[in-house]
Image (spheres, rainbow, N blue to C red):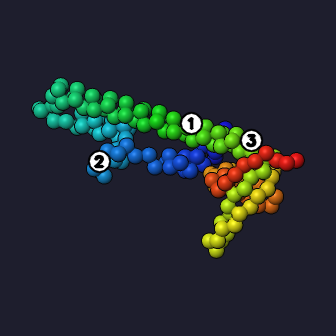
């Protein structure tokens, strides 16, 4: 699968805008594990030798780093899962549409002025257009969401 298809589905299903729903401060949202680790190393390197960081505080910081790492891995896994589901949904729609090739369908097409018109005809082909499955009937395209009836062709 091409990387462009994955990016398309990430954009289509809002996968690039993943949010955990936590209400963290805006200053903390930009911190990732690399920044956290650099801050921790800088703190240890620049600590006052007369008053070093306690073992308890060091362990607490390492535990926070471990938690951050686990949460990052979980978010990455969820993103992979969401992309996989989006790709499976696409394949399911294409499969559903391909079963309509050769069938007679009736549906509604909305004109640019907002009026609607009913069309009927034999499905010649199916394709994805802007993330929606579209049926090709002669020279016209009918989004699958606007199909009202499907019949076996009289041919």
Q: Which residue is mark 3?
A: 99
User: As rendered, which of 143 and 155 lies closer to the eye?
Assistant: 155
Q: Which residue is mark 1?
A: 84
User: As rendered, which of 13 and 151 lies closer to the eye?
Assistant: 151
Left or right position of 150 against 87: right
Circle 2 — which element?
Answer: loop
Tag nearer the camera, 2 or 3: 3
Residue 114 appears in the figure: yes
Left or right position of 28 against 47: right
Gap between marks 2 and 1 measured at Cα: 28 Å
Disc with the residue nearer the chain's start (2 vs 3): 2
Task: Determine which of the numbered discs, if any, sits on residue 23 in the image.
Answer: 2
- Measuring 70% from the left and 52% from the top, which residue is drawn there? 149
Residue 56: x %, y % from top left: 17, 26
Tag nearer the camera, 1 or 3: 3
- Measuring 67% from the left and 54% from the top, which residue is drawn there? 148
């Amino acid at each position: 699968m091409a990387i462009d298809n994955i990016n398309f589905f990430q954009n289509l299903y809002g996968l690039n805008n993943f949010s955990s729903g936590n209400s963290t401060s805006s200053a903390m949202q930009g911190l990732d594990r690399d920044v956290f680790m650099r801050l921790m190393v800088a703190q240890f390197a620049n600590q006052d030798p007369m008053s070093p960081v306690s073992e308890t505080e060091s362990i607490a910081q390492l535990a926070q780093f471990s938690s951050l790492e686990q949460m990052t891995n979980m978010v990455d896994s969820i993103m992979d899962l969401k992309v996989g589901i989006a790709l499976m949904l696409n394949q399911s729609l294409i499969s559903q549409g391909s079963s309509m090739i050769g069938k007679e369908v009736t549906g509604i097409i909305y004109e640019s002025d907002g009026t609607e018109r009913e069309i009927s005809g034999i499905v010649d082909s199916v394709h994805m257009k802007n993330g929606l499955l579209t049926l090709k009937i002669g020279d016209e395209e009918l989004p699958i969401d606007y199909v009202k009836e499907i019949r076996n062709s009289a041919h």
